[in-house]
Every structure is written in C-alpha cells, then in structure tokens.
Amino acid sequence: MNDVTVLVVDDESRMRKLIRDFLVKNGYEILEAGDGEEALKVFEENENKIQLILLDVMMPKLDGWSVLRQIRQKSKVPIIMLTARGEEQDELFGFELGVDEYIAKPFSPKILVARVEAILRRTNPEEKKVKDYGGIEIDTEGRTVKVDGKEIEMSLREYELLKYLVDNEKIALSRDKILNNVWNYDYYGDSRTIDSHIKKIRHKLGKKGKYIETIRGIGYKFEIK
C-alpha cells in the first residue's frame, strides 16, 4: 500500500506509537491526533490526502462519536473505530453513524493491519478488475474465477462467499458475520449452509482449497500459504 495516508486518533501516545510503527512498517504514511478537536483540525487540513481514519471512542475534548458525526457530514472516508468496549449495542450504534469497521481493544496489531488493508481494497475505486490470490484469479467485472488459468464454474453465492473471504484475507470471520455480509441480514436459515458452501468451493479450487482455513469455534479465514 504505497502513498496511502492514515489518520490515527487516540489520546494514548503509546497506542498511537504501536499503531504507527506497524502501519509504517507496511508502507503507510501516518498523521496523528491526540484528541477529538485536534483530529478534526488535522482532517480539515489534510482531507484530500487522508484515505482512512483509525478513531478511538473515549477521548478528551471531543469523543470519537462526535468526531465521526462531524466528519460524516462532509466525507465518506473509511473509518475504523477503536474502543475498549466490546458491547454489541456500541457496535450497532457505530454502524448506524457510518463506521466501516469496529475493533475492540486490546487487539493484535497484525489483525489491525489486515483489516485496514481489507477496507482499503473494498473502498479503493482504482481496484484492478482482475486480481490474483496465489493462483486464484478473480475477475470482479465478469464475476469469474480461474484456478491456475483454468476457469471454474461457481454459483453466484459461491462466488460472493469466495470474494468476501479474499477481500478479508488473513482475518478470521465468524459464521454470523459471513451470513450477514454474504447472505444479508434477512437470511434466517442455518449457519451450517456456510459449511456446505465452503466444502463445495474447496473442492472446486482443488489444491488451492487449502487457502480457506477452518477456525475452530469461530468460522473461516482465507490465507495464502
């Protein structure tokens, strides 16, 4: 990820340093703010440059929710909320206000970087139409999948499930999260339907099916090994 600028907003300097070090190591440019008011000032001065914001909830002067509301009045920049709380109600509240992702502290810096990359892939308008994932080529325009250059047949749901997994590469996804994002919230069936779809996808991918890893007690993760 070259030339991508991330605004890191947190009142804890150690937390900002931890995030900054990992993101810089992965090629990101970093801007920082230690409270809500400073965050709005930095964003206003660098609005055309900032491509993603990591925003803490509990901060002095202005909390994260207030910053989020003001930014959303004029910008759709991707925002990941960082919070010590892990309550479902807080997550729902954040999504209602326009949060793109929600990460509860403490978190693994490597997982944070993976989620940043996943969101940027989803929101980047310059995304390539055909992308290669370790020999699995996905054409987002033609909705086709090739394995080692050979096209394989997939149902629409199988394609959408595989695309969701690769878009969130290296992130462990729960069955509920997969259902909500691939089958949508109006699906009331058994989450075991995911397992049957995964089985079919693995079979169609052949040796590349090993990239879809089962995470015991959680769900699945796509990772090229």
Image (tube, rainbow, N blue to C red):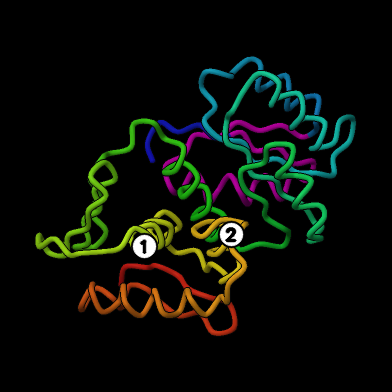
Residue 162 badge: 1
**Which element is circle 1 on?**
helix
19 relative to 186, above or below: above
Decide whether residue 21 is among the magenta residues. yes
Foreground label between 1 and 2? 2
Q: Which residue matches tag 2?
A: 180
In the displayed orientation, state which residue is furthest to the top: 45
Q: Which residues are magenta?
A: 7-34
Q: Within 10 angstroms of label 1, few (less than 14), some, or many (20 or more) residues?
A: many
Q: Nearer the viewer, residue 82 or 140?
A: 140
- For the point 64% across and 44% down, the residue is 80
Q: Amino acid at mark 1?
A: Leu
Query: Which of pointers 1 and 2 lies earlier in the amino acid sequence?
Result: 1
Decide whether residue 214 is among the magenta residues. no
Q: Nearer the viewer, residue 117 or 28?
A: 117
In the displayed orientation, state which residue is furthest to the right: 61
Q: Position of residue 143 (x, y in %)?
A: 27, 49
Say left or right for 180 vs 121: right
Say left or right for 1 vs 74: left
- For the point 85% across and 44% down, the residue is 58
